[in-house]
Image (spheres, rainbow, N blue to C red):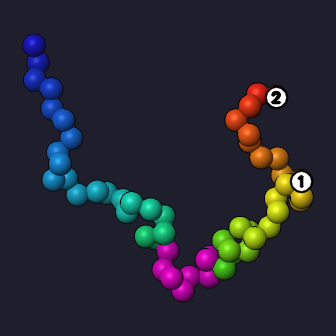
């Protein structure tokens, strides 16, 4: 039977844990993100997924 290796616990991550780690605090994209979050997307015509097939 072959030896099974697991993930090295000391391995450094290749990417940051979150996308926020890529974007600086003063980046203009944060304004756009805040604006989009303030919109009522259903009112504009977007459909939201409810998890049901109906």
Rendered location of residue 15, percent (x, y): 36, 59
Q: In this rendering, is residue 14 above or below 3?
A: below
Rendered location of residue 35, percent (x, y): 73, 74
Asked if residue 15 lies left or right of residue 5, the reply is: right
C-alpha gap between disc 1 and disc 2: 18 Å
Magenta stretch: residue 28 in it?
Answer: yes
Mark 1 packing: few (<14 Cα in 10 Å), some, or many (20+)?
few
Name the residue carrying label 1.
45
The residue at 15%/53% (across/down) is: 10
Q: Earlier in the sequence, mark 1 or mark 2?
A: 1
The magenta region covers 23-30
Name the residue carrying label 2.
54
Q: Quadrant of the C terminus?
A: top right
Rendered location of residue 21, percent (x, y): 43, 70
The answer to which image quadrant residue 18 occupies is bottom left
Residue found farthest to the bottom: 26
Rendered location of residue 13, percent (x, y): 28, 57
């Amino acid at each position: 039977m072959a030896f099974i290796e697991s993930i090295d616990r000391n391995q450094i991550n290749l990417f940051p844990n979150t996308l926020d780690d890529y974007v600086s605090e003063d980046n203009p994209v944060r304004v756009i993100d805040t604006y989009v979050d303030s919109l009522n997307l259903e009112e504009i015509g977007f459909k939201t997924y409810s998890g049901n097939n109906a």
